[in-house]
Image (tube, rainbow, N blue to C red):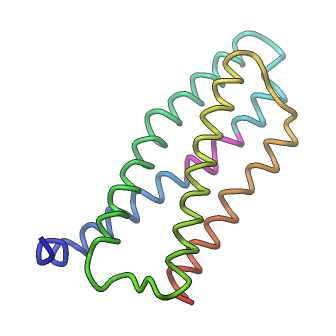
Amino acid sequence: MTDLLTSLYPYVKAFHIMAVISWMAGLFYLPRLFVYHAERGGTGVEPVGSFIIMEDKLLCVIMRPAMIATWLSGLCLVLTPGIVAWSLLWPWVKAASVLAMTWFHLWCGSERMRMKAGKTQAGRRYRIMNEVPTLLMIVIVLSVIVKY
């Protein structure tokens, strides 16, 4: 099993990076859709319906599969012997940041359900929350590249 993981490592890593890019794209865009939904969605029936369709498809068709692929490929990378030095700080910081990113994804899903039910928050709150994945991405990339 160890030899198989080691030989597949570059492919799993490439797949992991592609999955992360897809997941992050959704995490950057969905809160922006929430801003538009909250600020412009109340002007008529059709805009609200359009926002709901876009939010649903982004979350269910792109973000959820990308998150699952990110987690599965990331766990495969972690299980590859000699890749992660758990005695250092960076893998723990990355792990905590990935858990926070997953929490943010789940928060987006709960907000989508609230918005479908007609309960929106102020656009300003969604603008602020839109910065969360950017901050987490910075921490994750620095952790993996600098390996402090």
Q: Is residue 115 above or below residue 73?
A: above
Residue 74 position, x and y percent, is: 37, 64
| On-image quarter of the N terminus | bottom left
Q: Does the magenta stretch include residue 42?
A: no
How many numbered circles are shown? 0
Q: Is residue 35 above or below residue 54?
A: below
Residue 2 position, x and y percent, is: 15, 76
Q: Is residue 28 magenta?
A: yes
Q: Give the range drawn in magenta.
A: 25-32
Q: Residue furthest front?
A: 87
Identify the residue shown where x is 58% and y is 65%.
96
Between 30 and 76, the residue placed more toward the observer is 76
Res. 37 image quadrant: top right
Identify the residue shown where x is 60% and y is 48%.
103
Residue 15 position, x and y percent, is: 32, 62
Between 91 and 138, the residue placed more toward the observer is 91
Q: Which residue lies furthest to the top in this view?
A: 45
* Main SS, magenta residues: helix
Identify the residue shown where x is 47% and y is 33%.
60
Q: In this view, does 115 lie to the left or right of 88?
A: right
Residue 10 position, x and y percent, is: 25, 75
Q: In this view, does 98 lie to the left or right of 48?
A: left
Q: In this view, does 111 lie to the left or right of 106?
A: right
Q: In this view, does 69 lie to the left or right of 24?
A: left
Identify the residue shown where x is 58% and y is 45%.
105
| On-image quarter of the C terminus | bottom right
